[in-house]
Amino acid sequence: MNENLKALLIHQYKMLDELLSNANKNIVVIKPDNGKWSVFENIAHLGRYNEIFLGRMEGIQHKNNPAFESYVADNEEGFIEWSGKSFELALADFYSSRETIIKFFESLSDEQLERVGTHAKFGELTTNEWLHFFLLHEAHHLFTIFKLIHQK
């Protein structure tokens, strides 16, 4: 794995601490006027997606080119479960699940990073490309959290 990708994997998610450090604690559960997710729901989604993503990556390592549908969280049982956690527990579980993903990727060989799984929308992706997708998806939600915390 290239060093830039590895650095993002190891450090990007920690931005959440910085985003939340100056946030009014009441803001995390307030849904925006547009009906989209609150800060908390974005964190619950990221935590649940960590589980989904790790399962998919393990599947790619054990099966030849498995196919995966696009993940839709809103009514998915796991997301609903994550949304029912306390904010503190969801945050702790998010961090813990990310540490598991980091360890998983650190254990992969260059050959394993080239194994392929097919995404319903994006087609065949190597494990390395799946990691790009994962990190960009996470960055999108971190930006969303930033906007929610700083909305006027």
Image (cartoon, rainbow, N blue to C red):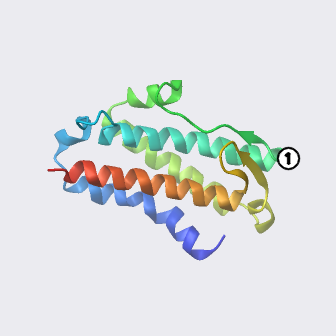
Where does the N terminus fall, quadrant-wise? bottom right
| In this rendering, position of residue 137 left or right of residue 40 | right
Where residue 118 appears, as percent x and y from the top left, is 74, 47
Dot 1 amino acid type: Asn
Where residue 86 appears, as percent x and y from the top left, is 33, 32
**Residue at 63 percent of width and 74 percent of height:** 2
Q: Residue furthest right?
A: 64
Where residue 152 appears, as percent x and y from the top left, is 14, 50
Tell me the crowding category of disc 1: few under 14, some 14 to 19, or many 20 or more residues within 10 angstroms, Cα based. few
**Residue at 79 percent of width and 57 percent of height:** 115
Nearer to us in this view, 147 or 4: 147
- Residue 113 quadrant: bottom right
Q: Which residue is mark 1?
A: 64
Task: Identify the secondary structure beneath mark 1.
Answer: loop
| In this rendering, position of residue 4 left or right of residue 86 | right
Where residue 147 appears, as percent x and y from the top left, is 27, 53
**Residue at 38 percent of width and 42 percent of height:** 42
Q: Residue furthest bottom?
A: 3
Give the total of numbered labels: 1
- 66 up-or-down from 11: above or below: above
- 73 up-or-down from 63: above or below: above
- Residue 29 quadrant: top left
**Residue at 20 percent of width and 41 percent of height:** 27
- 67 up-or-down from 79: above or below: below
